[in-house]
Image (tube, rainbow, N blue to C red):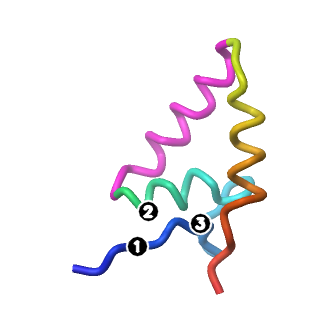
Amino acid sequence: MTTQTLSRPRQGRMIAGVCAGIARRFGWNVTLLRVLAVASILLPGPQVLAYIVFWILMPSDD
């Protein structure tokens, strides 16, 4: 079994591919993760900042 690295895919992106990359890495449902990410933005906290940091730090697929 190969371990998928944490990276943003070129295909299947909605905004930056952060949710798609995390879902692919851990084997989660990408739609559910996107819904949870949008719902979490409604709560107070640094969620948007965390998304931007992931966007900057996660490499794109080659």
Q: What is the C-alpha distance between the residues marked 2 and 3? A: 11 Å
* Residue lying at the far left of the rendered structure: 1
Q: Which residue is at 43% across, 62% downward?
A: 24
Q: Position of residue 31 (x, y in %)?
A: 47, 46
Q: Residues within 10 Å of mark 3 (few under 14, many from 20)?
A: few
Q: Which residue is mark 1?
A: 4
Q: Position of residue 13 (x, y in %)?
A: 65, 62
What is the magenta range?
27-43
Q: Which residue is at 75% across, 47% downward?
A: 53
Q: Quadrant of residue 58?
A: bottom right
Q: Which residue is at 68% across, 51% downward?
A: 54
Q: Are marks 3 and 1 in contact (CB under 8 Å)?
A: no
Q: What kind of residue is marked 1?
A: Gln
The mark lying in front, picked from 2 and 3, is 2
Dot 3 falls on a residue whose secondary structure is loop
Q: Quadrant of residue 51?
A: top right
Q: Are marks 2 and 1 in contact (CB under 8 Å)?
A: yes
Q: Which residue is mark 2?
A: 24
Q: Residues within 10 Å of mark 2 (few under 14, many from 20)?
A: some
The mark lying in front, picked from 3 and 1, is 1
Q: What kind of residue is marked 3?
A: Gly
